[in-house]
Image (cartoon, rainbow, N blue to C red):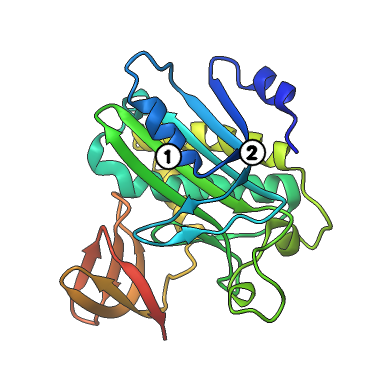
């Protein structure tokens, strides 16, 4: 499925941990993170993932033709502190969007906090960031490249899409898409660490929720308002007409 030799050649200096099948690339990356001698960055890649995870109790359903990987990094390499986690999630989603457009011509958007969607808000990719140990961060990415989970007519099939379907092409090369995502992620994460304002500008250009009236479920209860874009730290800004509130965590449950 992947051109492993090409990935090794173009990702010199990075450790590649490739498997035909894994339960979860992020679980594998966290196992590797526990070893203080593990070289970074480490890319955990599998041809088929059987037990992918999303935020909270959500599962990431992997279809044949999908791309699932996790990148184990030290965020300090990019000049990032622990409070920039939401911003790195958006920055990773931005890398997926830009890579999909570069490789396949697919126009995708960022749906806060960690999804990549098409213009109909059908999900094409998901991001999951975890920090198992100080100085260790796992960036998990799942992309529907050439197929989507589920069958036509099923509820899941009505809410997801693929890069190929969005681009209107038959197939997209998963190796080329992976390499483009990693290249964009390196560049964007360095820009985020350097407080490059163009990174935040590119978030805004891809914002799928801006201007929408929505309900956000938070630990303090539901919050409703118009989405006013992203704060510099990656928080979602909501306006009720009089006050703009910022939310680092939560789940968008309804878009009105």
Considering the image in quadrants, where does the N terminus appear?
top right
Horizontal side, residue 200 vs residue 202: left or right: left
Q: Which residue is mark 1?
A: 27
33 or 175, which lies in front? 33
Horizontal side, residue 19 vs residue 194: left or right: right
**Residue 137 location in percent, x, y?**
35, 34
206 or 64, which lies in front? 64
Q: From what the image shows, is residue 231 above or below residue 228? A: above
- Looking at the image, the residue that sits furthest to the bottom is 256
Q: Which residue is mark 2?
A: 178
Q: Residue at x 61, y 32 (%)?
A: 19
Q: Residue at x 28, y 73 (%)?
A: 217
Tag shown at residue 217? none
Quadrant of res 199? top left
10 Å neighbourhood of mark 1: few (<14), some, or many (≥20)?
some
222 or 199, which lies in front? 222
Q: Secondary structure at mark 2?
A: helix
Q: Secondary structure at mark 1?
A: helix
Q: From what the image shows, is residue 157 above or below residue 153? A: above
**Residue 100 location in percent, x, y?**
66, 49
- Looking at the image, the residue that sits furthest to the right is 170
Q: Residue at x 71, y 42 (%)?
A: 174
Q: CA distance from mark 2 to mark 1?
A: 19 Å
**Residue 202 location in percent, x, y?**
49, 51
Q: Residue at x 81, y 52 (%)?
A: 171
Q: Earlier in the sequence, mark 2 or mark 1?
A: 1
Considering the image in quadrants, where does the C terminus appear?
bottom left
């Amino acid at each position: 499925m992947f051109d492993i030799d090409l990935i090794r050649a173009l990702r010199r200096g990075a450790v590649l941990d490739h498997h035909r099948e894994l339960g979860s690339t992020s679980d594998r990356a966290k196992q590797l993170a526990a070893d203080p001698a593990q070289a970074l960055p480490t890319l955990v890649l599998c041809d088929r993932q059987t037990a992918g995870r999303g935020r909270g109790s959500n599962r990431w359903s992997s279809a044949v033709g999908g791309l699932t990987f996790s990148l184990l990094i030290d965020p300090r390499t990019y000049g990032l502190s622990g409070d920039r986690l939401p911003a790195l999630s958006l920055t990773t989603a931005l890398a997926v969007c830009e890579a999909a457009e570069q490789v396949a011509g697919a126009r995708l958007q960022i749906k806060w906090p960690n999804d990549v969607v098409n213009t109909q808000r059908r999900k094409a990719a998901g991001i999951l960031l975890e920090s198992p140990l100080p100085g260790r961060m796992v960036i998990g990415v799942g992309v529907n490249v050439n197929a989507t989970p589920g069958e036509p007519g099923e509820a899941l099939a009505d809410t997801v899409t693929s890069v190929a379907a969005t681009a209107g092409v038959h197939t997209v090369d998963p190796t080329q898409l992976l390499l483009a995502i990693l290249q964009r992620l390196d560049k964007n994460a360095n820009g985020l660490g350097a407080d490059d304002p163009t990174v935040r500008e590119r978030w805004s250009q891809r914002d799928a929720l801006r201007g929408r009236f929505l309900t956000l479920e938070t630990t303090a209860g539901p919050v409703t308002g118009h989405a006013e874009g992203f704060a510099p730290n990656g928080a979602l800004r909501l306006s009720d007409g009089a006050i703009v509130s910022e939310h680092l965590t939560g789940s968008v449950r309804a878009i009105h």
